[in-house]
Amino acid sequence: MSVFERLNWFRIICWLILAVILIVTVTPLWVMLKTALMPSSEVFHHSTAWWPTNPTLINFERVLGLLSTEESLKAGGSGAKVNFSLAMLNSVIFTGIIVVMQTMSAAAAAYAFARLRFPGNTLIFGLFVASMMIPGVVTFIPNFILIRDLGWLNTTMGMVAPFCLMQGFSVFFLRQFFLALPKELEEAAYIEGASHFYIFYRIAIPLSITPLITIATLIGINMWNEFLWPYLVAKDESHQVLTVALQGFKSQTPQGQPDWTGLMAATAISVLPTIGLLVVFGRNVVESIQFSGSK
């Protein structure tokens, strides 16, 4: 058998497709980082270059507020300002509250659907699954009216309230894992007189740490990148999350055009938490999704 006959062409084609997808995915990130490392005066002269010419970290120093306004203008900045540390803190609070609340509520609902028998169990679970087909933008107007009537505009409560309860995907995802838990453990606890809540808290949750980390990671990445809802309900600078602050930074054109290098530097810093989550928990996410899809 010749070398060419031994080649697995199907596998080669799959690897080529994956390589193309990888290039398409990574290229925008590289362009962002390259622009952030370039002096402002060279952005348009070397826009097609694959490597930054005269790389510098001064754009990162500008957006982090380490330089004065005069120094920023001298470095090629447009004079646009962004309170990066405050926006980062708001994003951490916004994302952290939703991750904790949504993970806890989704886990409780998923366990109830997986283990408890009550009238309408299947119907209600079907409605949860069906809710995944409703675009989120459809609920924006009623949610906005409710938040406005409650007087929660420009507050952290108004920003996190629509996301705190369980989401259809989170419930479906965690239910698949609770169904796979051995019933013998729970039956033994019942015999000892344990309640449903005790079994959920002391048995089901400790045995489901990996899927809980997975769903928390997915929720965290999704909420970290959320833009439209925080933009609608919290336009005040003191409550702006990072995505909204970056939009405001882009819109400022005191020198006639956006500060592209500063914007790319700020964006590069803002994606670091997301990349960190994927690096640390990426394997758990992939394995959990594969397990959930096979059930």
Image (tube, helix red, strand yellow):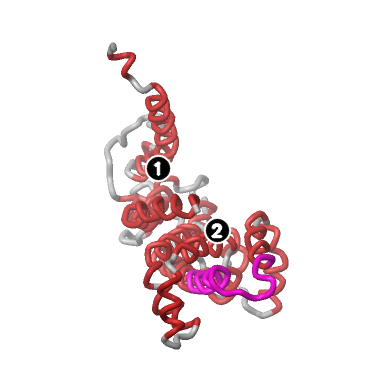
**Of 26 and 266, the residue lying toward us:** 26
- SS for dot 2: loop
**Of 10 and 147, the residue lying toward us:** 10
Q: Name the residue under label 2.
A: 227
Image location (x, y in percent) of residue 282: 36, 52
Name the residue located 46 percent from the left edge and 62 percent from the top edge: 180
Image location (x, y in percent) of residue 292: 48, 55
Amino acid carrying label 2: it is Phe
Left or right, 108 with respect to 125, comes to left
Q: How many labels does the image show?
A: 2
Q: Residues within 10 Å of mark 1 (few under 14, many from 20)?
A: some
Extent of the magenta region: 102-123
Q: Quadrant of the N terminus?
A: top left
Left or right, 112 with respect to 100, comes to right
Left or right, 166 with respect to 66, comes to right
Q: Name the residue under label 1.
A: 29
